[in-house]
Amino acid sequence: MKKSLLLSLALILVVFFTRFAWLTQYPPHLTQDEVAVGYNAYTILKTGRDEWGEKLPLQFRSVGDYKQPILIYSTVPFIALLGLTELAVRLPSAIFSALTVLVFFFLAKDYLFSSRHRRLAWVATFLLAISPWHIFYSRSGHDGYIGLFFSLLHLYFLFRFRSAPKPVTLWGIILSGFLAIASYHSTKLFIPLLDLIFIFLLRRQILEFIRRTNKFKLTVSIILIALLAAFTLSTFVFGISATRAKMTFLIQDFDYARVLLPQLPHFGPEALRRLGLLLSFWFKRYLEYLLPSFYLFDGLGIIMARQPGLGVIYPIEFLFFVIGFFTLFRTKVFRDNRFTTIVLLAWFLLSFLPASLANNSKHAMRSLPAVIPLIIFITIGLHKLPKRPILVALIVLAYLWGIIRFADYYLVHYPVQLSEHRQYPWKQAAQFAIQHADNYDQVVVDPRFGTEGPYTVGVPHYYFLFYSRFNPATYNTDPRRSQNSSDFANFTFRHVNWQVEDHQGKLYVGSPWSLPLKDIPDSQVKFRANFQNRVLGLIVVDGNY
Amino acid sequence: MTWSYYLLQGLLIVIVTFSLTRFFKWPLVSFLYLSLLPMLVFYRFDLPLLALALLLGSALYLLLKGSVLQGSVLLRMVPLAALVLLAFYWYRPTLDMQKIADYLQAVNQQRGEHLNYLPQLGRLLHNKTDLIYFLYTNLESYFSPVTLFAHAPYGFLYAYYPLGLLFPWDFLLLLKRRDLNVSAASDKRSLLTGLSAFFILLFPLTLPLRGEFNRLITLALSFFIALYIAGRLSTLPKKFLAALLLLNLGFLIWHYQLLPVYLLPL
C-alpha cells in the first residue's frame, strides 16, 4: 500500500513536470491553430456563437478547415476562469494528456496485465508518462490528445464490457466512442474499425448479452444507438465535416498529385488506373510507419525534414519494442493472452491507417493512438530481459541519455528550427501593432512570410484578435465577415505591393519580402521581429513619410 | 541494342531461376514466382551486376540452407564473403565520409545560429547520433520493408514510382508462422544465424557507401528473401497458390500498362 502510494506520487510528479511545468514558455509562442481555438472559445463564451456568427456549432468553420468541437468547448471554461490567455488555451490538451496516463494505468492494471504481472502496469504507465511521443504535442493545445484520451477510455469500457457486460458499460462504450470521433479526424476511421474487431472477437458475449436483456430496453437502446450513429455520421463524418479529410487526403499529396498522376499514360479507364496507383502509393506510405527511422530518428517531427532529429521513442526502447513485438504471441503476462494480443496488434496496425491515408509521410500526430500498444510492446520487451543489476543500470543510463536528448531538442532546437513553422514572430508584431493602431487610419497586414522567401502564408488575423482580445460580438457581426473577410476595426489583411501602395495614414505589418527594406527609410521601420534563429521575420513600418 | 539486352537479361533470369527450382518442393511454382519478380521484370541493371547479384543471393540461400556445403555456419560463410569481396573490388564503391563530414558541418552550422548553443554539449549530444542517422538512412534508402514491398531504391526505377522489388503481399508469407518445408529446426536456426552473420558482415560495409555496390547487395538480399518466400509457397494450399500466382501476374500486367512512362532509359 505504502509502495503504491509512493509510486502514485512519483507518477503524479512526472506527469505534472512533463505536461504542466512552464507550459506557456515551452514551446514558446502559440501556433495559429492555438490562437484560432482560443479566440473561437472566447467568442463562444461571450456570444454563444463562433467567429462566423454560427450559434453553438458542432463544426467550427475557422479558416475553412472545420475544426472539431471538443477542444474548443473544453477551452471555454478555462478562458472563463483565466481569461483569454496562453495558459487557458494550452491547459485542456495538457489535462487530457495527463488523464490519458491515468486511464492507461487503470486499463493496464485492471484488464491487460495478469495479477501476477501487475507491476508491469506501473512500468508501462511510467513509460507512457515519459514518452516523447505523448509529451511533445500535449503542451501545444492539440485536439489529437483529446481523441487519444477518449479512444483509450473507449478501449477501457470495451475491456470492462468483456469482463462484465452491463448496460452502463455499454453506454460508456458508446459515449466514449462518440466523443473520440467528435474530437479528432484520425479517430473517425480508427474507432469504427477497432469496434468491428471487438464485435467480431466478442460476438458470443454480445449475443448472450442481447439474449438476456429486457426486450423493451433493448429496442429503445437500439433505436437510440441508431439515432446517435446517424447523428455522428452526418455531423462528424460526412458533409462539411469531411472538408478537412478532403483537404488532407492522400490524393492531395504532392508526390502523387503533382509528380505521378500527370505522367500516368492514357490507357484504360482512368478511375481504375488512378485507384491502382493510389493503392500502391498508400501502401508505401503505410510501410513508412514501420521503418526503424520513424522510431529512432525522424518520427517526431521535432526538427526540419531530412535532418537528424528524434524518433517517437527513446533509442533504447527500440530494442525492447522489437523484442516485445516479436514475442507478443508467446508472452504470458496478460490476463487473456490471445485476446489481448489480437487487440493490441489490431490497435497498433490500425493506428497508422488514417495517418497513411493523409498527405504527409510519417505524421506523429495523426498516428498518435499507436503510442498505447507501442508502450505495451516496450514493457513486454523490458520484462523479457534478465534482471541483472548491471543491465538495469545500463538501461537506466540509456533512458537518461534519451531524456537529455529529448530535452535538448525540445527546449533548444525545436523552437529555433521550426520557428517559421510555428509562426513565431506574429505575436510580437501583433502586440506592437495593436498598441499603435489608434494612431493610424488603417493597419495593413500581409500574411506572407518566411526565412528563405515569402513561402509561408499564415492566418495572422487570429493573433491580432487574440492579443487585442477584440470584442467577439463586434467581430462576428461585422458586415465584412459575410464577404469572407478577416478584417476588423482598422485592421486589414491582404497582400501588399509596396511600390504601388499609397502609404499615407497606414501602418504596415509584413515580412521584408513584402516590405522591401531597401525602399523604406530606416527611421520608418518601427519594430523588427526576428525568428528564433535570428533571421528577420516581420517588420512594422510607418507609412507616413 | 535494347532487344538484345532484354533477351540476355531474360535468358539469365530463366537460367538462374530454373536451375534453382530443384531445391523446391514444387519446381514449376517456384520458377513462375521467381522469374516473374517485379525486380527482375521491370528493373534494368548491368548484366554482370544482375548475374553477380543473383549468384550471391542464390549462394546465400543454398549455403545457409545447408544443401550444398556441410559444416558450421561460419565455415559456409567463407565462400560467400569471398564473393562479396570480389564484388567489392569489382565495383569500387565510393566512400562517403567526406560527404558525411560536410553534412555534419552544415547541420552544426545551422544549430550554431542559436544563442543558447553550447558547442561542447552539442558535440557530445549530436555528432555521434547524427553520424548514425546519416549511415542508417543511407542503409534504409537501399534496403527496408518499403524498398522491398512498396518503393524500390533510388536509381532502380523512376524515383517516385510506388513499386517495390518484390510483390506487396509477399510480406504476409514472410510473417507466416509455418516455416520452410525443407528446413528442420536445426536448419532454421542455422539459417537465422547465417543470415544474421551475413547482415553483420555486410551492412557495416554498405552503411557509408553509395553506388553500384550497394545496389548489388540490395538486389542479392532481395533475391535471397524471394527464395526464402518461394520455399514457403509449398506450405500454401494449392488453390490459394494458383490464386496467388494469378494475382502476381495481374499485378505485373497492371504495372506494365502504367510503367513505360516512368522507366529509366537503359
Image (cartoon, rainbow, N blue to C red):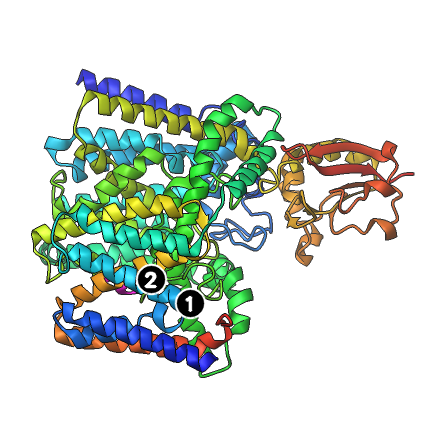
Q: Main secondary structure of the magenta part?
A: helix
Q: Residue at x 13, y 45 (%)?
A: A330
| Image location of residue B130, percent across then percent down | 47, 36
Q: Residue at x 42, y 72 (%)?
A: A275
Q: Residue furthest bottom?
A: A268
| Image location of residue A446, percent across then percent down | 73, 47
Mark identifier at residue B137: none
Q: Is residue A534 left or right of residue A199?
A: right
Camera-side residue: A186 or B98? B98
Label 2 crowding class (10 Å Cα cut-off): few <14, some 14-19, many 20+? many
* Numbered disc 1: secondary structure: loop
The quarter holding residue B215 reads bottom left
* Numbered disc 2: secondary structure: helix
Camera-side residue: B122 or B11? B11
Label 1 crowding class (10 Å Cα cut-off): few <14, some 14-19, many 20+? many
Asked if marks 1 and 2 touch (Cβ < 8 Å), the reply is yes
Name the chain letter of the residue that bears numbered label 1.
Answer: B
Mark identifier at residue B45: 1
Label 1 to label 2: alpha-carbon separation: 10 Å
**Same-subunit check for callouts 1 and 2:** yes
Residues in magenta?
Answer: B168-172
The residue singled out by tag 2 in the image is: B53
Tell me if residue A454 comes above or below residue A20 in the rendering: below
Tell me if residue A493 comes above or below residue A402 in the rendering: below
Q: Can you see residue A360?
A: yes
Q: Residue furthest top?
A: A2
